[in-house]
Image (spheres, helix red, strand yellow):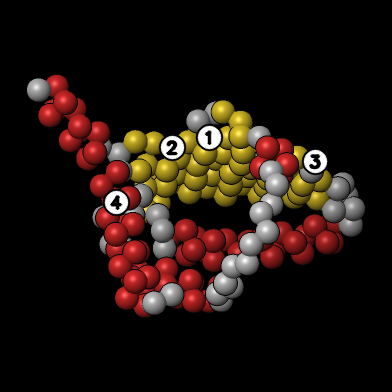
Amino acid sequence: MFILIFVPIIILCPFPIKFSLEYLNGNLKIYIFKKEISLNKIKNKKKKNYKRKRKGFTKYLTLFNNLNLNTFLKPNLKIEFFLQYGFEEAHNTALFYGVIQSFIPFINKLLLNFFNFKKIKYNIYPCFNEELIHFKIDSIIYVNIVKIIYMAIKLFNKIKSSKY
């Protein structure tokens, strides 16, 4: 009886996945649920020699753009970007600040294809006359198992019908 009540609740209720990525002084750290994932293990694995067919990136991009997920089916996302950067020349730092600000709408549009935003925040701090790069992303993705299954089936059917 307990299983009959508990399993539908787990399937239908969304659960949060906390994800963080931080780059500072040439070190990249990835955290999932505040547990660090070591990138050294990934780098040290032996690469298998096999041939794979290369397909154009544009084919997959058009596939995802044509998927047209309903807003109800997309996972919810809370995300916060933090960027603190600087170059030795102050004018290069100022120019780069303008370039970064112009890319924010593109990042929003890209993320909007796959997620519904609950909260999005950009913190960009230029440091003039000093060389520094500190980048951090903190996010919480609210995932529902039913939505994942539906999106996977829809994506599989789209790939099958378009013969990628």
Circle 4 is placed at which residue position?
A: 149
Q: Position of residue 25 (x, y in %)?
A: 80, 40
Distance between the alpha carbons at the discs numbered 2 and 4: 17 Å
> Could you tell me if the residues under marks 2 and 4 are in contact, i.e. CB atoms within 8 Å?
no
Q: Which residue does the numbered mark 1 point to in the structure image?
A: 32
Nearer the camera: disc 4 or disc 1? 4
Task: Report how far apart the C-alphas of labels 4 and 1 lie in the structure.
Answer: 22 Å
Kind of residue sitting beneath label 1: Ile
Q: Is residue 123 above or below residue 4?
A: below
Depth-wise, is mark 3 or mark 4 nearer the camera? 4
Distance from Cα at disc 3 to Cα at disc 4: 39 Å
Give the residue drawn at x 25%, y 47%. Answer: 146
Of mark 2 and mark 4, the one earlier in the sequence is 2
* Chain-order first, disc 3 or disc 2: 2
Mark linked to residue 25: 3
Residue sitting at 75 percent across and 40 percent down? 27
User: Amino acid under label 3?
Assistant: Asn
Q: Is residue 71 visible?
A: no
